Image: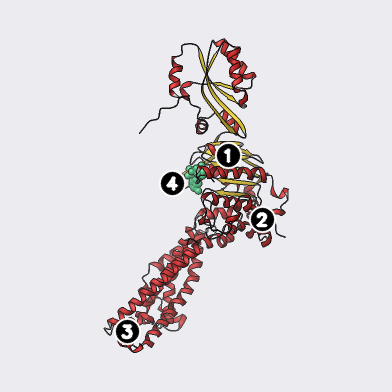
Amino acid sequence: MSETADEKTVSDRGSGNIVFQNVSKTFRTPQKDVEALKDVDLTIESGDIFGIIGFSGAGKSTLLRMINALEKPSQGKVLVDGEDINTLSAAALRKKRKNIGMIFQQFQLLESKTVYANVALPLKLNRVPEEQIRRRVEEVLEFVELTDKKNDYPSKLSGGQKQRVGIARALVSNPSILLSDESTSALDPKTTNAILQLLKRVNRELHITIVLITHEMHVIQSICNRVAVMEDGRIVEQGSALDVFSAPTQQITKNFVRTVINDSVPGLLVEGIRRETRNYKILRLKFLDTETTESVLAAVNKKFDVETNILFANISEIQEKILGIIIIQIIGSDEEIRKGLAYFETSRVGWQEINLEDNVQKKEVIA
Amino acid sequence: MREVLEGFLGISLDKINASIVETVYMVSVSLIIATVFAFFFAVLLAFTRKGGIFQNLVVYNVLNVVINIVRSTPFVVLLVAVMPLTKALIGTRIGPTAAIVPMTLSSIPFMARLMENSLLDTGRGILEAAQSIGATPFQCIVYFILPESLGSLILSLTTGVVGLIGSSAMAGYVGGGGIGALIQNYGYSKFNFTLMYSLVVVLILVTQLLQTLGNKLAALARKNK
Ligand SMILES: Nc1ncnc2c1ncn2[C@@H]1O[C@H](COP(=O)(O)OP(=O)(O)OP(=O)(O)O)[C@@H](O)[C@H]1O
Ligand SMILES: [Mg+2]
């Protein structure tokens, strides 16, 4: 009996964990060699929504395409559920790929086939009986909320609907991993959010590990629990989304974070701060629980001989947690400030002294 | 009616009918044979090239060169050059059946190139989608590339037919029969310009009709009405 979506056992399906071991990739072209990936070590855990962000040409697609062996490493290993994907026979690789769905920026649907036929195709190639195909396709179309479009051709659909078809096609064979190559980059912001929410449901309700690449930090902020930042073929920073958003270490990461949490101090305020003659420090505070924000600041003012001014405040939601970033000016003697900092620590508020000049809003240059 | 037409054209309608049947015969038989070979070669060209699903540079390069050679040989030269082959295959060098040999031969590389491009037009993206769902190379071709390039293939075929009508007229000129022969033997040589231009107009109309039909079918296959 042929292997079908609903007959897959748990062990067949795999848990969806991916390991890159020391992976490098060099593309040899007649003009020159391009080192697209350099010594990449990366672990993506089962259940993650793992975001990979970087500028164009950083090597994101190359990295992603190694997970289903559309691209082979020049060096190193890619393990999917513990199996080295590049040592599999052609037939075993095809079987493995049925476990790894993929969606694309340009959707890559068959324009000559209806929505139903597009989604049914992976099962048809597997010679699943017609009746089973029908049931499964209807199930996934319902999941992506496209039941009413099943007899339409893709040319009649909006971008968001096309991507839903893409997602349905990727899900139909019940994979454990979903790869997304800039799947929202061709969509408007509202549609982008709808697709991201759908991906979140794919992850939560169907227990599918998602690896997505993007150049928009907003995408990472909305749905990823872990993130890796790529620059020039390397992973320069990685960690939980919360950590990376609250305390980015690399300049490129700081710039990406700033596209969603603009923690720069308005120029007008800076003038006032520069005129301050008393002793002061500028601090960047990180609150993970905003209910305490005000009380902690109030307490510092009351308990110690310091004065605090809020220069900037931002509250955002990441990984379903509230992240508050507040930049304050704290005025007082070094001794009193030190006591205040100790108090922040005992109140579990992260702090970091910053150089104001790095955080001034650049005056817009009108060209 | 019949007498009026025959008087106008200066030739019996039976002769015209016979020549039309001959042309249809030459074009359709050549078309069928050429399509089969051209499609086969187009698939080979598109998939054995560098980066293709069945990459095989030896096959690709040999085919590529042969096709270029045949394609750059003018049809008139080909007509004469293949005569020994025609004689061997058909048993004679003249007549409609004999004309099918050079017509088919010149049409194969022409249509193979057009079809190759149709197949290549179906971008790498769709192929990757196919590979990502675990399709075999054969399934990639049958379930992804062919249906997606069908519209474009129909257009290539249409261009092929139009080309064949042209070469059938030329073949007629050197003893191949059909409308071409009629234009030469009863129109041009006998200074019957009414007949000549009437037949030319008919050829133009038929060509237009076929092209329109091809466009319609292609649009239908592409589902973009
Ligand atoms: N098949 C190939 N042949 C040669 N060079 C390639 C090939 N594929 C990718 N590259 C090069 O490798 C580098 C990384 O490409 P990659 O597509 O992974 O970048 P990316 O981060 O996905 O960029 P983008 O955001 O533009 O999609 C680039 O310099 C690219 O030109
Ligand atoms: Mg890319």
Element type where label 1 sits in the image:
strand
- Which residue lies under the disc numbered 2? A136
Counting residues from the start of the chain, the first of labels 4 and 2 encountered is 4
- Which residue lies under the disc numbered 4? A31
Element type where label 4 sits in the image:
loop
Please tell me if label 4 and label 2 are on a single chain: yes
Name the spot of residue A77 as percent of width and height, x first.
Answer: 62, 43
Q: Is mark 4 within 8 Å of ligand 1?
A: no
The residue under the point 39% across, 72% down is B207
- Which residue lies under the disc numbered 1? A51
Indicate the quadrant where residue B110 lies. Answer: bottom left
**B196 in relation to A185, above or below:** below
In the picture, which quadrant includes the N terminus of chain A?
Answer: bottom right
* Mark carried by residue B185: 3
Disc 3: which chain? B
* Mark carried by residue A42: none
Q: How much space separates mark 4 and mark 1, taking CA atoms?
A: 32 Å
